[in-house]
Image: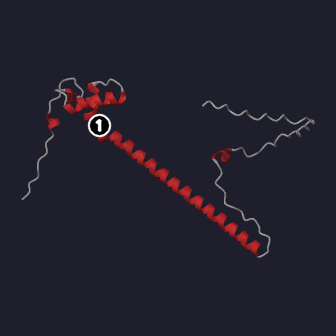
Amino acid sequence: MATAKKTTDVAGRRVKKAGEPSHARYLDGEHSEMQLLFAEWLEAKTGYKVDMTSTILASLLRSEFQRSPENQKRLAEQKARVEENKLAKEQRRIERAERKAAREAAQAERAAAEASGEKAEKAPVAKKPAAKKAAAAPAEKKPAPARKAPAAKAATKPAPRRRPAKPAAEDF
């Protein structure tokens, strides 16, 4: 018969010192060899003199941060954004494939019409949806200003040709 193992909350039974933050208990006692090695490694990799207290807290509380509700919320939002981007990318891929199929069908139709000797009509090809700027454009358009005709170029002699480059002297 298997008995259920009782779990205890050792950290919960510890008495907090008056006025200390809840994680100050991690700083009591001596530093482990791994914490010292981690601090040395950080200094070697970054060239920055690290604070031992911050290094200890970072190494001990990283997993607690990962489990925190704030981080879990951030991760869920990030996952939703990634999924949304994947769906949008897939939708764009489908639209491109549809446009390509329509172009190929129109080309095949024109080729068949030309082969039979008829004049091929251009079939309308599906275009990309209009950009957001086009939707925000005003309804009435102003007429384009009249352009001046380009001035006739005066008969001038052509630009002189460049002299060929001199061969490089051998410096051997």
Quadrant for residue 158, please give it.
top right
Above or below 74: residue 30:
above
Q: Which residue is drawn at 13% across and 42% down?
A: 8
Where disc 1 sits, the SS reads helix
Instruction: Assign the C terminus to one quadrant of the image.
Output: top right
Residue count near mark 1 (Cα–Cα under 10 Å), binned few <14, some 14–19, many ≥20? few
Q: Where is residue 139 in the image (x, y as percent from the top left)?
A: 73, 46
Q: Residue at x 52, y 53 (%)?
A: 89
- Which residue is more in the foreground, 91 or 68? 91
Above or below 98: residue 70:
above
The amino acid sitting under disc 1 is Arg
Q: Which residue is drawn at 56% across and 55% down?
A: 92
Q: Which residue lies furthest to the right in this view?
A: 155
- Which residue is more in the foreground, 39 or 94? 39
Quadrant for residue 129, please give it.
bottom right
Instruction: Assign the N terminus to one quadrant of the image.
Output: bottom left
Q: Name the residue under label 1.
A: 62
Q: Residue furthest front?
A: 172
